């Protein structure tokens, strides 16, 4: 049985990138596994690594929890939980901080980009990969489905698990990273050299899961391409044609095809149609679920209780192995 685990951080409203790179894959994993083999969570503790307004954070968590269900995750098949409601995450994070090296954390791209050298960077942004490793190792998953940008963190997790097992005995399963064939790195439509991010201030190049069709159409229509007008202008080339390549990747991930398309106008129409069709069922279910926030909260409360049960023995094993 393939146990899958992954989390998403509530630091902004979910984007098409989060959906294609992660959330949609969680649903596929749930559907391919035996009941309760999958654990998917909101990494709300991770949200605090950067400043958040408490009211906005609460609203973001509620929306994201609802979107997990709207996307098709089913509490009868997968365990849905909140990291902050499972204290073992914090406990194991400390133990793993006692095994990780500063040299390893200094190499993390996300820390380098978001905080290194800035005096007001929160300490937790630096130690974040140890908490993320705890998130994973507590559940002994064999597979961690993520987008490409999280690969480095999962690889560090593997290194920490291997070192821990070698030093203290075989406590952890060493997990495998799994990224999708298309949609693993959806780029910003305005700045295709940068990944589409849910927590960016100028979000004119971002498509959110709950964006209505007219917003999707406008954003895709304004997506940056290039001035190539040749007969083979519509072709993938990450370096020379990042904008066009991104649109092709989105089209593919949303089930469309670029066969026979030769102009950027036609490409953008096809992308709009495919994205709108992909988002529509999620938005429909979201509208129904949003009417019942107590139900959504109860699903995550029940899932968190189950996560507390599952993780207790792993934490106990790790603690004992270290001599405490
Ligand atoms: P986060 O919240 O930034 O992103 C959530 C998931 O979405 C994927 N993703 C993307 N995929 C494709 N294109 C994009 N533009 C794009 N942007 C984001 C991410 O790769 C991720 O899979 N630290 C993690 C959350 C986390 C986690 C974990 C993940 C906490 N603990 C344990 C796996 C296992 C994060 O901030 O992801």
Image (cartoon, rainbow, N blue to C red):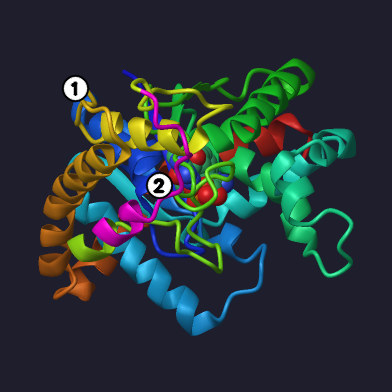
Q: 76 and 26: which one is in front? A: 26
Comes first in the chain, label 1 or label 2: 2
Q: Quadrant of the N terminus?
A: top left
At x 49%, y 23%, the residue is 237
211 relative position to 288: left or right: right
Indicate the position of residue 103 as horizontal and vertical percent values: 88, 34
Q: CA distance from mark 1 to mark 2?
A: 29 Å
Q: Quadrant of residue 97?
A: top right
Q: Secondary structure at mark 2?
A: helix
Q: Residue at x 39, y 25 (%)?
A: 230
> Label 1's element?
loop
Asked whether residue 163 is in view, the answer is yes
Left/right placement of residue 104 relative to residue 286 reads: right
Q: Quarter of the image for the C terminus: give it.
A: top right
Residue 260: mark in rendering: 1
Does ligand 1 reach within 8 Å of label 1's beta carbon?
Answer: no
Res. 305 in view? no
State yes or no: residue 234 in magenta.
no
Front residue of 5/283: it is: 283
Q: Position of residue 56 (x, y in %)?
A: 47, 79
Where, by quadrant of the figure, is residue 26 drawn? top left
Can residue 225 be found in the magenta stretch? yes
Which residues make up the magenta segment? 217-230
Say left or right for 74 vs 170. left
Residue drawn at (54%, 36%) of the image: 136
Residue at the disc numbered 2: 18
Rendered residue at 48%/39% (across/down):
226
In this rendering, is residue 228 above or below 288? Answer: above
State which mark lies toward you, 1 or 2. 1
158, above or below 10, in the image: above
């Amino acid at each position: 049985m393939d146990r899958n685990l992954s989390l998403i951080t509530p630091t902004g409203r979910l984007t098409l990138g989060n959906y294609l790179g992660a959330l949609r894959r969680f649903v596929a994993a749930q559907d391919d596994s035996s009941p309760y083999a999958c654990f998917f969570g909101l990494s709300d503790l991770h949200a605090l690594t950067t400043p958040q307004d408490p009211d906005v954070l609460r609203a973001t968590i509620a929306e994201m929890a609802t979107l997990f269900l709207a996307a098709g995750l089913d509490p009868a098949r997968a365990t849905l939980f909140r990291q902050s409601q499972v204290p073992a995450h914090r406990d194991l994070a400390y133990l793993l901080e006692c095994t990780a090296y500063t040299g390893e954390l200094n190499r993390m791209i996300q820390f380098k980009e978001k905080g290194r050298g800035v005096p007001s960077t929160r300490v937790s942004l630096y130690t974040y990969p140890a908490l993320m490793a705890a998130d994973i190792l507590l559940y002994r998953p064999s597979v961690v489905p993520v987008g490409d940008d999280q690969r480095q963190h999962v690889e560090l997790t593997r290194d920490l698990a291997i070192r821990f097992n070698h030093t203290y005995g075989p406590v952890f399963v060493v997990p495998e990273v799994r990224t999708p064939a298309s949609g693993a790195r959806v780029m910003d439509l305005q700045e295709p050299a940068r990944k589409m991010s849910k927590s960016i201030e100028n979000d004119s190049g971002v498509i959110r899961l709950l964006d209505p069709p007219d917003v999707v159409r406008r954003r895709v229509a304004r997506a940056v391409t290039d001035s190539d007008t040749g007969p083979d202008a519509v072709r993938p080339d990450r370096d020379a044609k990042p904008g066009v390549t991104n649109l092709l990747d989105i089209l593919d991930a949303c089930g469309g095809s670029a066969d026979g398309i030769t102009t950027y106008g036609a490409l953008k129409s096809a992308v709009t149609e495919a994205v709108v069709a992909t988002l529509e069922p999620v938005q429909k279910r979201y509208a129904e679920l949003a009417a019942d926030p107590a139900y959504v909260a109860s699903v995550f409360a029940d899932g968190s209780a189950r996560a507390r049960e599952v993780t207790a023995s792993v934490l106990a094993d790790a603690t004992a192995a270290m001599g405490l």
